[in-house]
Protein backbone atom coordinates (compact mmCIF):
# COMPACT_ATOMS: atom_id res chain seq x y z
CA UNK A 1 0.00 0.00 0.00
CA UNK A 2 3.05 2.28 0.18
CA UNK A 3 4.11 3.99 -3.06
CA UNK A 4 5.93 7.20 -3.86
CA UNK A 5 8.66 9.14 -2.12
CA UNK A 6 9.58 8.23 1.46
CA UNK A 7 12.18 9.62 3.82
CA UNK A 8 15.03 7.33 4.84
CA UNK A 9 15.67 7.42 8.58
CA UNK A 10 18.89 6.23 10.22
CA UNK A 11 18.18 4.37 13.43
CA UNK A 12 19.40 5.64 16.77
CA UNK A 13 21.25 2.35 17.29
CA UNK A 14 23.28 0.08 15.05
CA UNK A 15 25.56 -2.66 16.30
CA UNK A 16 29.14 -2.78 15.10
CA UNK A 17 28.73 -6.41 13.91
CA UNK A 18 25.76 -5.37 11.73
CA UNK A 19 27.74 -2.40 10.39
CA UNK A 20 30.64 -4.69 9.48
CA UNK A 21 28.28 -7.16 7.76
CA UNK A 22 26.80 -4.39 5.62
CA UNK A 23 30.22 -2.89 4.90
CA UNK A 24 31.50 -6.25 3.61
CA UNK A 25 28.40 -6.72 1.46
CA UNK A 26 28.77 -3.24 -0.05
CA UNK A 27 32.44 -3.96 -0.80
CA UNK A 28 31.36 -7.01 -2.82
CA UNK A 29 28.54 -5.24 -4.66
CA UNK A 30 30.19 -1.86 -5.23
CA UNK A 31 33.95 -2.05 -4.57
CA UNK A 32 34.51 1.69 -5.14
CA UNK A 33 31.68 2.80 -2.86
CA UNK A 34 32.75 4.62 0.30
CA UNK A 35 31.06 3.99 3.62
CA UNK A 36 31.69 6.30 6.60
CA UNK A 37 33.48 4.83 9.61
CA UNK A 38 31.18 3.30 12.21
CA UNK A 39 31.65 6.23 14.59
CA UNK A 40 30.74 8.76 11.88
CA UNK A 41 27.52 7.08 10.72
CA UNK A 42 24.52 9.40 11.12
CA UNK A 43 22.18 8.27 13.88
CA UNK A 44 18.57 9.22 14.67
CA UNK A 45 18.25 11.39 11.57
CA UNK A 46 16.61 11.58 8.18
CA UNK A 47 19.45 10.95 5.74
CA UNK A 48 17.73 10.89 2.36
CA UNK A 49 14.75 10.04 0.20
CA UNK A 50 13.86 7.10 -2.01
CA UNK A 51 10.88 6.22 -4.20
CA UNK A 52 8.93 3.04 -3.42
CA UNK A 53 7.90 1.77 -6.86
CA UNK A 54 6.59 -1.69 -6.00
CA UNK A 55 6.95 -4.74 -3.82
CA UNK A 56 7.42 -8.45 -4.32
CA UNK A 57 6.91 -11.56 -2.26
CA UNK A 58 9.84 -13.51 -3.75
CA UNK A 59 13.34 -12.24 -4.50
CA UNK A 60 16.92 -13.48 -4.52
CA UNK A 61 18.11 -10.52 -2.45
CA UNK A 62 20.24 -11.40 0.57
CA UNK A 63 18.35 -8.68 2.48
CA UNK A 64 14.91 -10.18 1.86
CA UNK A 65 13.24 -12.06 4.73
CA UNK A 66 11.44 -15.14 3.37
CA UNK A 67 7.70 -14.90 3.87
CA UNK A 68 7.82 -11.08 3.93
CA UNK A 69 7.28 -8.57 1.14
CA UNK A 70 10.28 -6.68 -0.20
CA UNK A 71 10.08 -3.12 -1.48
CA UNK A 72 11.38 -2.16 -4.92
CA UNK A 73 13.19 1.17 -4.62
CA UNK A 74 14.29 3.80 -7.15
CA UNK A 75 15.85 7.29 -7.29
CA UNK A 76 17.78 7.37 -4.02
CA UNK A 77 18.65 10.93 -2.94
CA UNK A 78 21.11 11.63 -0.13
CA UNK A 79 20.64 14.78 1.94
CA UNK A 80 23.71 17.00 2.16
CA UNK A 81 23.24 17.22 5.92
CA UNK A 82 21.29 14.65 7.98
CA UNK A 83 18.27 16.13 9.75
CA UNK A 84 18.02 15.02 13.40
CA UNK A 85 14.74 13.30 14.07
CA UNK A 86 13.43 10.59 16.38
CA UNK A 87 12.09 7.68 14.40
CA UNK A 88 9.52 4.93 14.87
CA UNK A 89 9.09 1.43 13.56
CA UNK A 90 7.24 1.00 10.27
CA UNK A 91 6.15 3.91 8.08
CA UNK A 92 5.24 7.19 9.79
CA UNK A 93 4.37 10.73 8.80
CA UNK A 94 7.32 13.11 8.67
CA UNK A 95 6.47 16.29 10.63
CA UNK A 96 5.76 19.27 8.36
CA UNK A 97 8.70 21.34 9.70
CA UNK A 98 11.07 18.50 8.70
CA UNK A 99 9.43 18.22 5.27
CA UNK A 100 10.30 21.90 4.73
CA UNK A 101 13.91 21.31 5.85
CA UNK A 102 14.23 18.34 3.48
CA UNK A 103 12.78 20.38 0.60
CA UNK A 104 15.30 23.18 1.16
CA UNK A 105 18.19 20.70 0.83
CA UNK A 106 16.84 19.31 -2.43
CA UNK A 107 16.66 22.67 -4.24
Image (cartoon, rainbow, N blue to C red):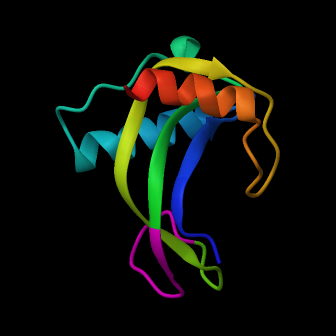
Asked if one can make out residue 42 in the rendered structure from this viewpoint, the answer is no
- Identify the residue at image location x=77%, y=52%: 92
In the shown orientation, is residue 38 left or right of residue 72?
A: right
For the N terminus, which image quadrant?
bottom right
In the shown orientation, is residue 91 left or right of residue 60?
A: right
For the C terminus, which image quadrant?
top left
- Identify the residue at image location x=29%, y=25%: 34
In the shown orientation, is residue 83 left or right of residue 74?
A: right
Asked if one can make out residue 88 in the rendered structure from this viewpoint, the answer is yes
Frontmost residue, 21 versus 101: 101
Q: Is residue 97 magenta?
A: no
In the shown orientation, is residue 79 left or right of residue 3?
A: left
- Identify the residue at image location x=60%, y=81%: 66
Vertical order, 57 against 8 (above or below): below
Vertical order, 23 against 39 (above or below): below
Q: x and y percent of residue 43 in the render?
A: 66, 23
Residue furthest to the top in view is 40
Q: x and y percent of residue 17 in the render?
A: 60, 35
- Identify the residue at image location x=57%, y=12%: 39
Frontmost residue, 86 versus 25: 86
Q: x and y percent of residue 7 in the render?
A: 58, 44
Frontmost residue, 19 versus 54: 54
Q: Main secondary structure of the magenta part?
A: loop
Task: Point out the stretch of residues depicted in magenta.
Answer: 53-64
Vertical order, 2 against 21 (above or below): below
Q: x and y percent of residue 91 in the render?
A: 73, 57
- The mark total stands at 0
Vertical order, 64 against 68 (above or below): above
Amino acid sequence: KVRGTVAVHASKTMSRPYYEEVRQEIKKLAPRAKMPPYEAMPRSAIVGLVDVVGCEAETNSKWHDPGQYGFLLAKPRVLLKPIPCDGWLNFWEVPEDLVRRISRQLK
